[in-house]
Image (spheres, grey):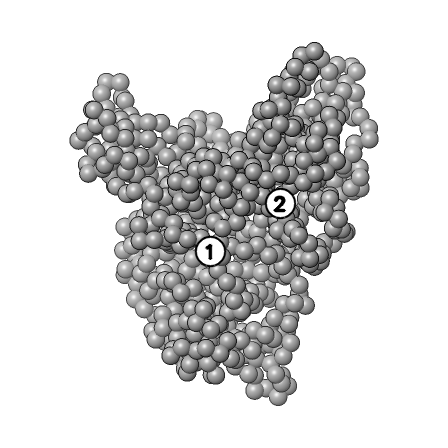
Amino acid sequence: MAGKDKTSRLKQSPEARQKPNFRAKQNRDGTMPTREEIVDYIVRFPNHASKRDLAKAFGIRGDDRIIFKALLKEMEEDGLLTRDKKKYHPVAELPSVTVIEIPFDADSDHMIGYPAKWDGDQESRPKVLISKGKNDRAVPAPGDRVLARIDRDENKDPIYTARPMKVLDKPKKALIGIVRKTDKGARLIPVDRKGKEMQIHQGDIGDAKEGDLVEVEQYVSGRMMVPRARVTHIIGNPKSEKAISLIALHNQDIPYRFPNSVIEEAEAQEAAGLEGREDWRHIPIVTIDPADAKDHDDAVYAELDDDPANEGGYLIYIAIADVANYVRPESAMDKEALIRGNSVYFPDQVVPMLPERISNNLCSLVEGENRAAMGLVIKIDKDGNKLDHHFHRVLMRSAAKLSYQQAQTAIDGHPDDKTEPLLEPILKPLFAAYAALEKAQKQRSPLALDLPERRIRLNEEGLVEDVFVPERLTAHRLIEEMMIQANVAAAETLEAKKSPLLYRVHDAPSQQKMIGLKESLASLDINLSIGENVKPMHFNKVLAQAANTDNPHMVNELVLRSQAQAEYTNENYGHFGLNLRRYAHFTSPIRRYADLIVHRALISALKLGDDGLKPGAESKLAGIGEQISMTERRAMMAERETSDRLLAYFLADQIGARFNGRIAGVIGAGLFVRLDKTGADGFIPASTLGTDYFVHDESQQALIGERTGERFRIGDQVEVRLMEAVPLAGSLRFEMLSKGEKTKPIGRGRSKRSFGTKSKGFARKRGKRSAK
């Protein structure tokens, strides 16, 4: 149905999709519209899909509204519709193979699960019936996560049925909370908002003190089976970074302790030798990473090509840690790596995908040490166009460990003692090769968003000391572009060998998002052409126009929000942001499971060893892509949670202080503001914006005063006062001090695409008028 809906939507003109100029079935005979009619209407008119809009379109009146409301609720429960704030959206088809989560409280006789990957509200996830058969090899139970084949039948309830293929390991979730001492012992105050307080007996407190963040195990006692907690681990001061990151790990179900079997397997590994490998130890290849990097999974070197037919061209040598040599399919480390999916990075600690023996030792391309690697040689011409590439399995030795700042300072004419001897033979050819690649990159024209990324610096106590934006160096871009070239080469090689692989894909923006972006940009007098074949260069032209305005931040934010989310899949539909037809992550197997899969595929396809993909691996790739796309999203959420909590603690003693910031988001209920210096995000309720009645205008991404025309729009520079900080929740509340821009008042007749929010000062006046 999803494919059919998409086709019908594309056939509609933008105007038809935005303004329904007819009423659907008028309901004069007292019957309800069919489910298919409702879904078809929502697909055709996505911006007019509130409950009120639907009732109006189908002529639902009087008591029929109650029946109609119940019908919409049933369609949500059956997985046909999902609701985003006030609007309904049709649910896309679940993929044929996906990961299903089964709640712990599921009925074992009629087991219902939900898709693990779901972009909408979690409450709107479609139900999936878990089928059971006598001869099934995979037999799931409540609480399990399963890789399953999905069947759809709209005549059944629920419409989706899952046939389990494999029960996936799921990490156990530790229980953590804050200790509050009482006369009889203590209480555990959970950090999870849905958690319940539990009593801690005096003998179960251990060395925990008042206010400590602790990890506990739960048990029941007494005839009433009252749940109690026993402290098993003292995490420490909840203001410290380690404690705060553990809260995020707990909330996102991210495992952070390796099972003994995984540790033992890692410790038993021995360093690879030269057997079965080419010797690259004579090549002066170097690592260039952040100054505080603990693992180094890529190294680079470049030299002028001596081929007379390629005058001015270069040979680029890239070595990537050979993780596949140590982490074999179906091993304990492999299973744990798939559960984790990726490493998770916090301001002062890393939760690695692989044990330290692998990630920081055997696989890290340490300076002066022999290391197993997957080698790649890329041949480019003087304009950066790739002429050829070939992969090798090698033994290499890093000639130097450099930081981005070291390499950049040296190339800028100020080498230190370490980079002085490397400047002519290594660094200058590397930067020259990148200069050639940059020419080809500009021709390719990838999406050029300018959104600086802030970093948090902590003090010795693990608390925020400073927030800064790292300088963007040519050395950063050099490594990024060479890694992009390596990833493209991996995808091209595997496609040529007709090998299964996991692509890194990024879809083009949806037509609906493009229409919304066009309207928002039009309010800024910026034109966006939206033909059928949208390319990154169309956005880059918009960004170039915005660079010459007073508010380029707003346009960058709007363009970013219009983009789809990148993911991993065994089906290729290209990478829109990079403007590449095929792309696969290959360069970071220490920290991403997707890269390990690509390494194994290359080993198998190029016959480089017996540790590649196993027979039948192709059938598993769809589920693996679902799994690691999910783990990537949860890692991003954990990292964001931790930053929010750290910044909330940092600002908690500055209540009443004034700050400069920008409006980062607008909803009917208020404004999200991001502070300039720290990047901390806070909320301003619309009810506190003076004495007017503010209307949310989606096309302008703004709140506009009904009487005054005062406008607060995304990207606006504002001054705010901090009113409240809740560190454990990572939330801040601000008061607006700036005046909004004066525009034409909206008046009492609100736009269909907008809805209003009364301010406290004006609510009473409107109430009196309406009472009359």
Quadrant of image for the C terminus: top right
**Residue ID at (33%, 31%):** 189
Residue 246 placement (x, y as % from top left): 35, 44
Residue pictured at 75% horizontal, 35% vertical: 744
Q: Could you tell me which secondary element the residue under label 2 belongs to?
A: loop
Q: Say which of 698 and 515 sits in front.
A: 698
- Residue identified by numbered label 2: 716
Q: Looking at this rendering, what residue extends furthest in the left direction?
A: 203
In this view, the residue in front, 438 or 387, is 438
Left or right of 760, for residue 106: left
Instruction: Give, as a three-letter code, the residue at label 1.
Output: Phe
Residue 182 or residue 23, whichever sits in front: 182
Residue 27, visible in the rendered structure: yes
Left or right of residue 468, residue 64 in this image = right
* Residue 326 visible, this angle: no
Q: Position of residue 210 (x, y in %)?
A: 25, 34
Looking at the rendered structure, which numbered label has been put on residue 468?
1
Q: Say which residue appears at 75% left-offset and 14% top-offset.
A: 30
Report the amino acid beneath label 2. Asp
**For residue 745, side relative to residue 363 (left or right):** right
Residue ID at (50%, 69%): 475
